[in-house]
Amino acid sequence: MKRLIFFPLVLILIFSGCSIKSPDDYYNKIENGELTATVSINCGTAVDYEDSKREKAEILSDCKVNFKDGDTVYDALKNACKKNKIQFEYSGNGDSIYIEGIDYLYEFDCGELSGWKYSVNGIFPNKGCNVYKLKDGDEVDWLYTCDLGEDIGDKYEGE
Amino acid sequence: MNTFKNFHPITLFFYFLFVLFISIFSFNPLFLIFGFFGSISFYACISDFKAVFKSIIFYIILIFAVTATNPIFSHNGATVLFFINDNRITLEALIYGAVLGLMIAVAVIWFRCFNLVFDSEKILYFLGKSFPRLALVFSMTLNFIPNLLRSFKNINTAQRLSGKKNSRIKRYLNSFSAVITQSMENAMITSDSMRARGYGLKKRTFYSRFKFTFYDLTYLAVSIVLFSLSLVGNTSFEFYPYFVIPKSDTLNILSYVSFLILSFIPFLFEVKEGAKWKFLISKI
């Protein structure tokens, strides 16, 4: 008897933090805001990668998105993907959100040094994408790298 | 009846190696379904039906659990069912989970069959010459858990009937500690006695009744041929982002059919031997 109550309670607890939406609902609800940014998504390095199935480098070019004051790069990407019905997958929450894949192209798909990075106005901030706050008119580029950022013009300065 | 285990250990080992290899690495639903039915029918032949029925329910629960959990962690796939917090739950991830669950179930059933067919005598024969220590440890571990369960049952019954009014948890704890002590003692005794008999030495000879006959050779050859035929076709299945179902050309059909035969061989063998036994009995 205890178990019969316990199990649904746990399920309710798990799902209480989630908002479940149908695809139409999800894609039709576009965020409003007074500020604008442009988002581009490019995977040119994955196209050039050996025996790659990708043919188009441009996934999204110069898409204008609206955002509110205090929104981050992640919010801009989310809105841009929503607007254009592009798939993306993230893991983590809060400050530690990490983009695993965009448009079915995932990290580690092109070698073990590959993944998604972003630059704002041509500079790679090397911060979490949900930490970096956007300003009005920023240009966000999401770039796929096969070599820890060296092939897209970012020098990796770790160990 | 378990006449399948009368085959030579080498033949049996390679048979299970082939079947498990294809079941685990092919990741093709059709192969897995063949493997599932082949292994479960063979398992039903060599153990009792009631246990098999119970285990089938367990496997179905396992498959459902994996199917339900995979879409929560994998959001790849083009067919969206619904969204949870900006992450999509997709049909592809659901089906990938189902295939993964089936793969786990098939591997577990084949290993159960392997355990029933490949007893400790065979393990000692198979590994004894080249890896005596490994063979010893392997056969002792295989023996350890059934022994532990049996003595736990005995001690627990004794505790229950001793008249003490302990709660169930306390009784289980008591029995558990008693079982652990007993098994440690047993391990010492066993290791002493086995060392005295020369186990674990490289030069020790084993008496075994296994003889590699023509029958074993034929069976081994048949399973090698069927195994290599099942690898001929290009049967790799792609799940993400769209399903890519391999074309059903002649080579693929050939490999499907040969794996179907390969996974049903033990069952057919058991059926054949059972029929033969019944026929011979009816003549008496």
Image: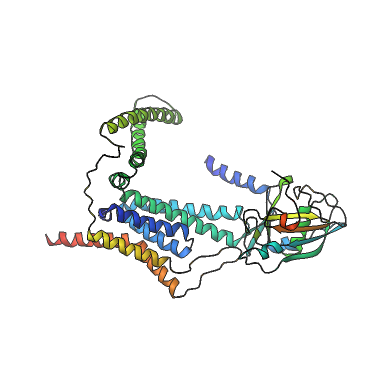
Q: Is residue B70 something that shows in the picture?
A: yes
Question: Which residue in the rendered view is the most extreme toward the top?
Answer: B164
Residue displayed at 72% across by 60% down? A26
- Residue B71: % across, % down: 59, 56
Left or right of A27: which side holds B39? left
Looking at the figure, which quarter contains the C terminus of chain A?
Answer: top right
- Horizontally, residue A51 falls left or right of residue A120, namely left
Does residue A86 appear anywhere in the picture?
no
**Residue located at (82% from left, 49% from top):** A133
Counting from the top left corner in percent of width and height, residue B37 is at 39, 61
The one nearer the camera, B33 or A17, is B33
- The residue furthest left is B284
Front residue of A12/B220: it is: B220
- Give the vertical position of A155 relative to A41 (above or below): above
From the viewer's perspective, is A90 left or right of B158?
A: right
Q: Quadrant of residue A85?
A: bottom right
Residue drawn at (30%, 39%), measured in percent from left and top? B202
Q: Is residue A151 left or right of residue B222?
A: right
Q: How many marks?
A: 0
Q: Residue at x 34, y 53 (%)?
A: B13
* Quadrant of the rendered image containing residue A147: bottom right
* Image coordinates for residue A128, horizontal then vertical, percent: 74, 48
**Closest to the observer, B283 or A150:** A150
Q: Position of residue B35 (x, y in %)?
A: 40, 60
| Figure check: A153 above or below B228 | above
